[in-house]
Amino acid sequence: MSFADRDGVIWFDGKLVPWRDAQVHVLTHTLHYGMGVFEGVRAYEAGDHGTCIFRLKEHTDRLFRSAHILRMEMPYSKEELNEAQRLVVRENNLHEAYLRPMAFFGSEGMGLRADNLKVHVIVASWHWPSYMSPEAKKLGIKVRTSSFTRHHVNITMCKAKANGNYINSMLALREALDSGCEEALLLDNEGYVAEGSGENFFMVYDGVIYTPELTSCLDGITRKTIFQLAAECGYEVREKRITRDEVYVADEAFFTGTAAEVLPIRELDGRVIGAGERGPVTEKLQTLYFDAVKGRLPLHTEWLAPVK
């Protein structure tokens, strides 16, 4: 089914509009130049808590940070955007959902100056099943190191979740899929591991969890969640530069992200990682993560934002 032809409603500039009527002009500035910011957010059925948006505040905070970095003046408050996200889940009668808040420049002008443009904001939500198959969450996925380099910090704003940044991700992912893999691993401009096409990267070696420093990587919210869960389990997490061959000889490796959740990596560039399936550390953190989003972790109910 086309995303343009669905039932339901979308929050558009402060109002709920019918899904099929949520349209923009072909000369919308962001369509031409890619200057916009967005979030990927998920809502889960969380037991007695009902349907809850996971880490809603943190996602909205990052959306506003991204807009600030790109000098986009948000026309709504964080509280209004938080309520809009709850609203679209409720009004679309979704028990579990993927949410897409986005701010973009309209069609008030054209050209690179991008002045006198209005910032428009939408929030959509729909049912979107797991990013990967259930089997992949246990057996892991095959990954290829991309020939495309991840963004440099002085080429684009790496801490902004910006629309145009994802051209790099799409090219890398397509290359990986064409080679028979399910995901790409991108290196930074110095050849060190950065992240996946839309995920942060972790590896386990000799009982220690490693992840790349946040240079060209997005400051992932699932990444932060794993940091906290790992610490509470007594695992040491170190941020450092990671080389590709260190990943080849790791005991375990996994991706994290709102869409990917916690996703084991079984193979990189034809080299089997560890036992070639989800390892014990990955399994522990994956289990805790799903307990958290499903409301089964009493320690972190503050991460859940009920939609009702």
Image: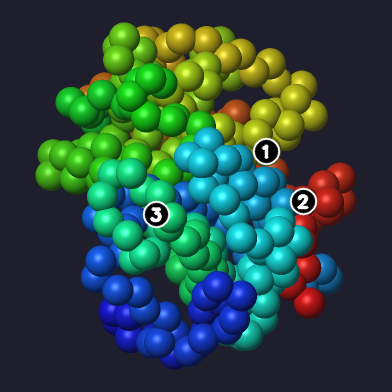
For the residue labelled by badge 3, is the local secondary structure a helix, a strand or a loop?
A: loop
Asked if residue 123 lies left or right of residue 273, the reply is: right
- In the image, residue 35 lies at what x, y percent? 37, 48
Q: Quadrant of residue 208?
A: top right
Packing grade of label 2 (10 A; few <14, some 14-19, many >=20) is some
Residue hosting label 1: 225
Q: CA distance from mark 3 to mark 2?
A: 24 Å
Q: Which kind of residue does numbered mark 2 sit on?
A: Trp
Residue at 59 percent across and 81 percent down: it is 15
Asked if residue 24 lies left or right of residue 161, the reply is: left
Residue at 44 percent across and 30 percent down: it is 158
Packing grade of label 3 (10 A; few <14, some 14-19, many >=20) is some
Asked if residue 162 lies left or right of residue 2, the reply is: right
Residue 58 can be seen, yes or no: yes
Where is the N terminus found, in terms of image quarters? Answer: bottom left
Please tell me which of labels 3 and 2 falls first in the chain: 3
Please tell me which of labels 1 and 2 falls first in the chain: 1
Residue 132 tag number = 3
Q: Residue furthest left?
A: 178
Q: CA distance from mark 1 to mark 2?
A: 9 Å
Where is the C terminus found, in terms of image quarters? Answer: bottom right
- In the image, residue 34 lies at what x, y percent? 32, 49
Q: Give the label, 3 or 1, closer to the camera.
A: 1
Residue 303 tag number = 2
